[in-house]
Image: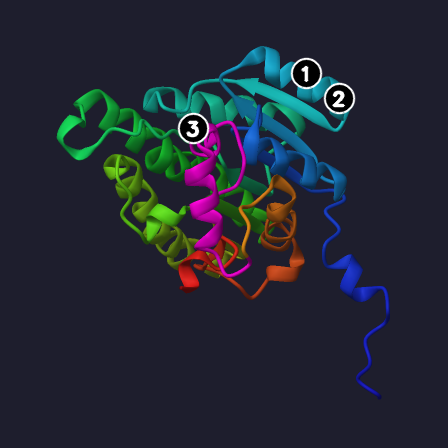
Amino acid sequence: MTGVLPMETPFNLFDLTGKVACVTGASSGLGGRAADVLLAAGAKVVGVARRADRLDQWANDAGEAAATVVGDLSRRDDVAGIAEHVKDCFGPPDILVNAAGINTREVADDVTAEGWNITLDLNLAAPFFLAQAMVPAMRKSRWGRIINFASLQSFRAFSGGLSYGASKGGVTQLTRAMAEAWSGDGITANAVAPGFIRTELTAPVFSDQTLSDRNASQTCIGRNGELPDIDGPILFFSSDASGYVTGQTLSVDGGFTAK
């Protein structure tokens, strides 16, 4: 007994063949990238978003392993129905990626009840209630993966980000609480906290070259992020490779929070 693993074992850890994933916010940005990564790893993927045209385009490009559910997760009363529609596509998901989000960019003195509510409902409440609806099937199979999206603002206070920061700070604790509640049933819960990655949501930041350059200079790596930078973390948290990792938030920020 040499203790040497077969060469194919490390690669099989990331194989998602036979798994079903649900990705919210799949019509663009981080959610769209996560959906593509899981498809490439062999999973069947249900994309959830508000924009039917963008979802249809993604599904047409992805082929028969992709399905779509159009819905607004910021409407809390609609979340249970959306979850049922997701299950009708390929069966109950084994993997849930909560990537849908909003940032109203209201400074503290201008925060409105409407902006606060939609931010907390979409960024914090929807990930929990959607996961809650998916957990029974994951528990039955003794295997499940929940991946939430935290943020730099889970740890740092930014101007214009009071409600967004509150929601993303909540996501880190939500992730730990999910892990405590469900990991004994074979369901892990982890979060990815991206730095400044070029997406539709961060377009206002990248449109200001001075601000973009300043953000890049605050990382250890010396650049801002691009969508492929989340591929590895998403695949890790979605697969058997992370079977003994739960309740954790991984900063994918080029070392921004390390300084």
- Label 2 packing within 10 angstroms: few (<14), some (14-19), many (20+): few
Q: Is residue 171 visible?
A: no
Query: In terms of secondary structure, where does tag 2 sit?
Result: helix
> Which residue is tagged 1?
57
- The kind of residue tagged 3 is Pro
Q: Which stretch did the figure color magenta?
A: 195-221
Residue type at the position of mark 1: Gln
Decide which of tag 2 and tag 3 comes sooner along the chain. Answer: 2
Q: Kindly check if marks 1 and 2 are in contact, taking CB atoms under 8 A apart as contact.
A: yes
Can you name the residue that lies furthest to the front here? 210
Q: Amino acid at mark 2?
A: Asp
Q: Mark 1 to mark 2: distance in Å?
A: 6 Å
Q: Residue 4 got which mark?
A: none
Q: Secondary structure at mark 1?
A: helix
Find out whether the residues at labels 2 and 3 contact each other: C-beta distance under 8 Å: no
Residue under the image location 60 percent in, 11 percent down:
53
